[in-house]
Amino acid sequence: MCPVRPLPSQGWSRERVLDHLHTLKVQPPPWEHGRLFSLLYDAGPEVRAVLREASLLFAAENALNPLAFPSLRRMETEVVAAGWR
């Protein structure tokens, strides 16, 4: 179980945040080789690059409130509809 830490009284620098995130991602599982059954599907480096760029476009938008973000509501509707075809 991970220890819960209180929020710091002063914010962290960019470097400290990224260093901390890198320590959390110590040993990622070998997902690139198809070894994680049903947990992750890798479509290759080109698709991963598009995924990174697309996620940056919507990183500050909250998908829990699709009424405030109509573009997210539309994407959600299109994905759900695609599953019914």
Image (tube, grey):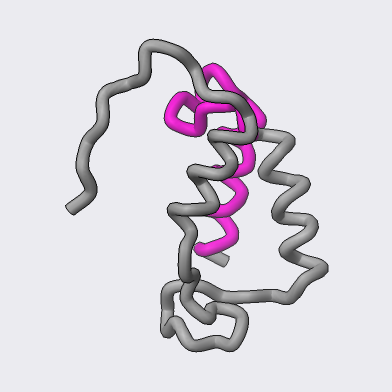
Picture quadrant where residue 16 is located = top right
Q: Residue at the location (54% across, 17% down)? A: 68
Q: Nearer the viewer, residue 76 or 44?
A: 44
Residue 73, above or below 75: above
Outermost left residue: 1
Q: Residue at the location (26% across, 31% down)? A: 5
Picture quadrant where residue 47 is located = bottom right
Where residue 27 appears, as percent x and y from the top left, is 47, 70
69 in the magenta segment: yes
Quadrant placement of the C terminus: bottom right
Where residue 38 appears, as percent x and y from the top left, is 42, 79
Report the span colored magenta.
Answer: 59-83
Where residue 35 appears, as percent x and y from the top left, is 48, 87
Q: Residue at the location (72% across, 63% down)? A: 48
Residue 42, above or below 49: below
Q: Residue at the location (51% across, 63% down)? A: 84
Where residue 45 appears, as percent x and y from the top left, is 77, 71
Q: Nearer the viewer, residue 45 or 77?
A: 45
Left or right relative to 80: residue 74:
right
